[in-house]
């Protein structure tokens, strides 16, 4: 059983990826930067996938807030485009900074709008969702080890 609810779990992912961006910016060695860039992309892809498979549909069912969801999905699509470019050009620091900006914006939307609404919603079992998110994440991480 998860020890914390789904919003806390997802926010821990957010914090972890923001720390990786900090490490990326502090790294002066090109190889280290490339390793961090691919780790960041991988973590983000898994995070977006579990949100889209598990958290967003539960949020939609419980709140019907399509405006927030459409925004979030659009931001995921934009992030995926940036990630594809970075994966083809891992040395491109400018793209990494653009990705960081976009992710920061998206994370703030989830943290300040979507997660508070989810915690208020009736009929979202945030503890059960945390278990599902965790299980799916470990599955996906095994498929694509960093
Ligand atoms: Fe998201
Ligand atoms: Fe997220």
Image: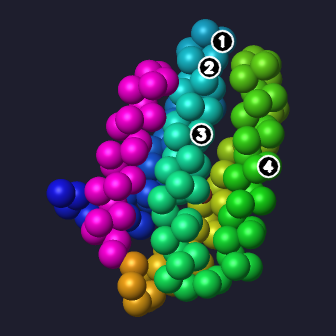
Q: CA distance from mark 3 to mark 1?
A: 23 Å
Residue 128 lies in the magenta stretch: yes
The residue to which callout 1 is attached is 30
**Which of the labelled discs sits on residue 33, or is there none?**
2
The part of the chain drawn in magenta is: 125-146
Kindly check if marks 4 and 3 are in contact, taking CB atoms under 8 A apart as contact: no
Q: CA distance from mark 4 to mark 1?
A: 26 Å
Q: CA distance from mark 3 to mark 2?
A: 18 Å
Residue 27 lies in the magenta stretch: no
- SS class of the residue under badge 3? helix
Kindly check if marks 1 and 2 are in contact, taking CB atoms under 8 A apart as contact: yes
Q: Is residue 13 above or below residue 22?
A: below
Q: Is residue 26 above or below residue 10?
A: above
Q: Residues within 10 Å of mark 2 (few under 14, many from 20)?
A: many
Q: Is residue 123 above or below residue 138?
A: below
Q: CA distance from mark 4 to mark 3?
A: 12 Å
Q: Which residue is at a point 32% across and 46% down the rendered structure image?
A: 135
Q: Position of residue 73 (x, y in %)?
A: 71, 60
Res 32 → quadrant: top right
The residue to which callout 3 is attached is 45
């Amino acid at each position: 059983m998860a020890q914390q609810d789904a919003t806390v779990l997802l926010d821990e992912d957010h914090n972890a990826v923001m720390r990786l961006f900090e490490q990326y910016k502090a790294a002066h060695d090109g190889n280290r930067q490339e390793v961090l860039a691919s780790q960041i992309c991988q973590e983000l892809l898994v995070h977006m996938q579990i949100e889209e498979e598990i958290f967003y549909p539960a949020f939609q069912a419980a709140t019907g807030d399509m405006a927030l969801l459409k925004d979030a999905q659009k931001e995921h699509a934009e992030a995926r485009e940036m990630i594809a470019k970075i994966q083809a050009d891992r040395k491109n620091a400018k793209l990494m900074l653009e990705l960081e900006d976009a992710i920061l914006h998206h994370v703030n939307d989830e943290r300040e709008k979507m997660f508070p609404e989810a915690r208020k919603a009736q009929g979202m079992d945030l503890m059960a969702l945390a278990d599902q998110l965790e299980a799916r994440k470990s599955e996906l991480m095994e498929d694509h080890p960093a």
